[in-house]
Structure formats: structure tokens, C-alpha cells
Image (cartoon, helix red, strand yellow):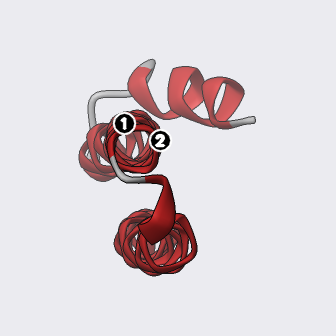
Amino acid sequence: MFLPMLLQAASEFNGSYTGAWAMMGAAIGAGIAVVGAGIGIGGVGGKAVEAMARQPEMAGRVGTQGLIFAALVEGAALIAIVVAFLIVGKF
């Protein structure tokens, strides 16, 4: 989606050239945010399953806390993606 706009803006060496770099940075930032959220949620899920295996009587409580932490990680990634879209909207 961003690639045609990026290539068109990068082909000209004027004021829109800066916009092309901003769009590329926003795209890379959004990608890193999604990858980071995936790693974070995977870590939370893995540790939650490990904790449930060690103490099965605490499974309900650990599962609830795991869901809360996963939602917090996803919220941080969503904020990063919204900021990336706001940067793209400026150019």
C-alpha cells in the first residue's frame, strides 16, 4: 500500500522526498510494533501455561492475569500503529 507512494515520492529530490522517508519510517515502525507485540504476547502465553502446569490449582487466576497482560501489550502495539498512521497522514 505504501510502496507506490514511497517510490513516487523518492523519485523526486524536492520537498516530498522528506515525506517519502517519513512514510518509510512509519511503515517500518508499524512493522516493528507488530513483531514486538507478537513476541510479547507469546512470552506471556508461554509463561502462563508454564505457571499453570506447575500449580494447576492457580490456573484460573494465572489465566486471568495472563489475559490482562496480553491486552496491555496489544494496547501498546495499537498505540504505536496509530502513531505510524498519523505520521503517514501528515504527508
Number of marks present in the image shown: 2
Image quadrant assignment for residue 5: top right
Q: Residue 77: x and y, percent?
A: 41, 63
**Of the residues shown, which amino acid type is indicated by label 2?**
Val
Q: Which mark is residue 84?
A: none
Q: Is residue 21 above or below residue 76?
A: above
Q: Residue at x 41, y 35 (%)?
A: 46
Label 2: element kind? helix
Q: Residue 41: x and y, percent?
A: 44, 48
Asked if the residues shown at circle 2 and circle 1 are in contact, with their CB atoms under 8 angstroms apart, the answer is yes
Image quadrant assignment for residue 76: bottom left
Left or right: residue 71 compared with residue 22: right
Image quadrant assignment for residue 25: top left
Question: Which residue has dot 2 on it?
Answer: 49
Q: Is residue 28 above or below residue 76?
A: above
Question: Which residue has dot 1 on it?
Answer: 50
**Of the residues shown, which amino acid type is indicated by label 1?**
Glu
Q: Quadrant of the N terminus?
A: top right
Q: Residue at x 49, y 54 (%)?
A: 56
Q: Residue 70: x and y, percent?
A: 46, 65
